[in-house]
Image (cartoon, rainbow, N blue to C red):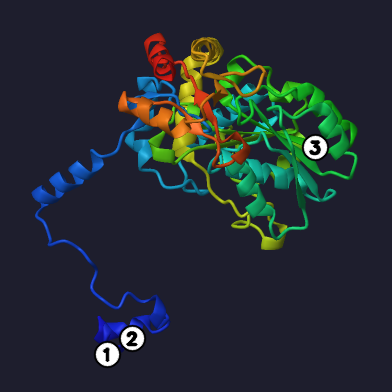
Amino acid sequence: MLQAIGVAEIEELFTMVPAGLRLGRDLDLPPAMGEWELTDHLTALAARNTPAGNTACFLGGGSYDHFIPAVVDAIASRGEFVTSYTPYQAEVSQGNLQALFEYQTLVTQLTGMDVSNSSLYDGGSAAAEAVLMAAAGRRGRVLVPDSVHPEYRRILATYLANLDIELVPLATPGGTLQPETLEVAVGRPTACVLLQQPNFFGCIEELETLAGIVHRRGAKLVVAVDPISLGLLKRPGDQGADIVVAEGQSLGIPMGFGGPYLGMLACREEFLRRMPGRLVGQTVDRRGRRCWVLTLQTREQHIRREKATSNICTNQALLALRAAVYLATLGPRGLREVATLCLHKARYAQERLAASGRLRLAFERPTFKEFVVRLADGRVEEFLAAALARGIFAGIPVARWYPELKDCLLVTVTEKRTRSEIDQLAEIVG
């Protein structure tokens, strides 16, 4: 191979790498193993992990341990879907396009929006893309409360770093954005406001009131939602949202050590031509038969870069399919039942944990399935270790994002958590 490309030795291929960045020795690898030995070795390494599915999982913050009906795996694992390449027009199959069209329809019904794309990468990138949609050609300030997921805020800061758009944080010391805080902030020219419902702390924001303030000032409203909560809460489109985004992992997608996940994005029709990603439309072929096509492709891949609305040129087709199967399986009644179970079990957990006298809610606000608790002795890591020793992931320390909450823990209760598991958690607190 070296002779064929006219190179004397392999080191010549790496001359552009500075000497200080080269290892300068052989890799420190153990002796080669046979397939049997290697399989045993890797199995032993994997056994050192503790998957959430093997515990009583009270983790949340964007990744949730919800029940996944068997039909979701049965359909999504069919070879026609699993082996299909990312769907580019015109070689994409009608079956894949129809599945994505069904997904888009379900998302618009769920959110109360006019149109949905066929998915983005995850909730964080969807939120950032939505802000770019809302801020395009408008006054350059974007308001984001501290109650929005901290990772969403970091992604957004990265997106906006080299654009002429000012990212303005809003304090939420009480766990939610206060209307008077927003009223003052939007007094200056503002392009859009990003809210989360329920927010990162699990608290319910006063969405309709906040939406009224945003629109009176001529700004646009982007709302990031928990799709499961929409089984109970009023749809964001019915409360004044202009663009709705979500992390779709809770809709039939495993926690999977953090991914891959599903970014959901839907909007009012006025934003249709700025929508990133893929959009599947329904039409008729030359024989008058119903069929589906990719349409309104405003991406860099298809048009001149300076006219593109986004550099995202693909979607999470397989995960969007899982979400569509999950939503179609449950239907409105089933989704309401799941949301109701989350609500009641979370309320029971709050009461049992508070009864110990050793912790209390950090924010006295209505919540859905997540809530922040404050440990009286502040020994968060000790508590987590004690719970893990009994096979329980007790929650997420929030100090990594909110240093002022160093004695606090974000606890999530989905429909899968049992009374026994909640009681065990309360016993550990005691």
Marks 3/1: CA distance?
A: 62 Å
> Residue beneath label 1, please?
8
Quarter of the image where the N terminus is located: bottom left
Marks 2/3: CA distance?
A: 56 Å
In the rendered structure, which disc, 3 or 1, sits on the residue that comes first in sequence? 1
In front here: 187 or 280? 187
> Residue beneath label 2, please?
12
> How many residues crowd around disc 1 within 10 Å: few (fewer than 14), some, or many (20 or more)?
few
In the rendered structure, which disc, 2 or 3, sits on the residue that comes first in sequence? 2
CB atoms of marks 2 and 3 within 8 Å: no
CB atoms of marks 1 and 2 within 8 Å: yes
**Residue 306 x/y as whole percent:** 71, 62
Which residue is depicted at the point 40% across and 22% down? 68
Q: Is residue 335 visible?
A: no
The amino acid sitting under disc 1 is Ala
The amino acid sitting under disc 3 is Lys
The amino acid sitting under disc 2 is Glu
Which mark is drawn over residue 135?
Answer: none
> Residue beneath label 3, please?
220
In front here: 115 or 334? 334
